[in-house]
Amino acid sequence: MFFSRVIVPLSILALGGGAWYYLGRPVEKPKPISLPEQLIKTEIQEMTPSDYQVQIESQGSVRPHYVTTITSLVPGSVTVLHPCFEDGAFFEKDQVLAELDPADFEAAQASAEARLARAEAALQQEKARAKQARLNWEDIGYDEEPSDLVLRIPQLKEAEASVKSATADLDQARRNLERTKIKAPFAGRVKIRNVGLGQAVGASSPLGEVFASDYAEIRLPISPSQLNFVKLPAEEADAPVPVRLTDASGVINDHSWLAHIVRTEGTLDEATRELFAIARIDDPFGREKKSPPLRIGQPLRAQIEGVNLPKVYVLPRKALRGVNRVYMVEQNPPVLMRRTIVPIWSTATEIIVQEGFTPGEKLSTSSLTYAVEGAKVEIISTPVDAVSEGNAADTSPKS
């Protein structure tokens, strides 16, 4: 029987012995590392009551307060079209827009003048005959009073009636001649002209469409929830409500127009239950104040001046946590506490609350995604830019 010999190098034996020695030693547990407590960081706003001016947002389109169709009152052919009777042209009250051929009406006036002259002559003759008839009656020596036929009273009345009729005919002829000049009924602007030079028109033929330029109107819808926050005029003597208008089409971004709500419509919209208020815009085309002109049909945004809410709390909308809930920061130590609010007014950036706060309380305004009630917080200062912007927003009128 033969046995094989296994030769193991000394280096391997030494390594195995070291490993055995290491595995035999007890392993020490790692010591726990103490970490500082993680606090939720938040910005705060100190609750201070103040007066708040409500601004109601609305929108509408510019429209003239009335539009009129210019018509001819007499027939004729158009001989003159003045420059003020072009599409978009301005005109003043009683300015001549167009003229018709006056020849026939001048002849009619001359004929009426002749008829009046004949009637007046006939009247003078009848007055002389009536006077002579009375003298003849007295010369004969009759004691009784002469009759109307003797004194030619019926003939005298007939002559007077002829004069009145001829005078009326002359007045009518003069009016018809004057009507050959088509005049503007008010100061305004031409929307469209429908007649051409040399065109024959009849009585009541439409010549064009014009609208007044002294002021324009805009129809602004107000929802039922907003009606309690604005004092709309109900009577003519009621004070108008100021409105600030800005362009909604994006063409004019650096200008606004001042308007005033002067009346409201008598019915609510059947679909939306909104009430439409009518605002008046003076000098809409910038002819007096040289402001950017408005266009009929131009869309505008409106900020209606509402009531002033006294002693209310203005919260930034970003402070809301869910439906009508906010986090308050209570001191010693600072922790978060939920609170339910009851808004009385809101905008895209602000929530207005009448009650539920005490002056001096701290409102958390930072976005706290995983915050829970009772969590400890660390109050951080608001950036300087944000503070300045907030102060500017508080002191400037809401718009």
Image: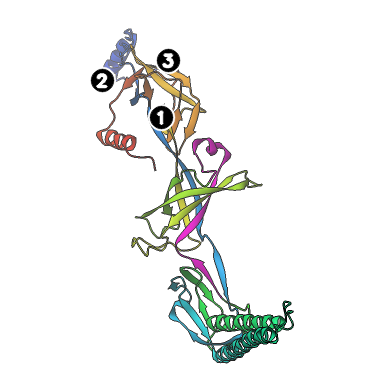
Badge nearest the viewer, 3 or 2: 3
- Please provide percent x and percent y for residue 389: 30, 37
Give the mark nearest the N terminus, 1 or 2. Answer: 2
Locate residue 396 relative to residue 352 in the image: left or right.
left
Question: Which residue is tagged 3?
Answer: 374
The residue mark sitting in front, 1 or 3, is 1
- Name the residue at 50% across, 25% down: 342
Q: Position of residue 278 (x, y in %)?
A: 52, 51
Q: Nearer the viewer, residue 107 or 200?
A: 107
Q: Amino acid at mark 2?
A: Ser
Q: Position of residue 290 (x, y in %)?
A: 33, 62
Q: Which residues are magenta?
A: 208-235
Question: Which corner quadrant of the image does residue 82 belong to?
Answer: bottom left
**Looking at the image, is mark 1 or mark 2 nearer the viewer?**
1
Q: Are marks 3 and 2 in contact (CB under 8 Å)?
A: no
* Residue 212 lies in the magenta-colored region: yes
- In the picture, the disc for residue 118 is none
- Where residue 14 sits, quadrant-wise, is top left
Q: Residue 354, can we see it? A: yes
Q: Amino acid at mark 3?
A: Gly
Q: Earlier in the sequence, mark 3 or mark 2?
A: 2
- The residue tagged 1 is 315
Q: Residue at x 58, y 79 (%)?
A: 72
- The CA span between labels 1 and 3 is 21 Å
Task: Tell me if mark 3 has few (under 14), some (14-19) or many (20+) residues whose alpha carbon lies within 10 angstroms of its own.
Answer: few
Q: Which residue is mark 2?
A: 11
| Mark 1, secondary structure of its residue | strand
Q: Amino acid at mark 1?
A: Leu
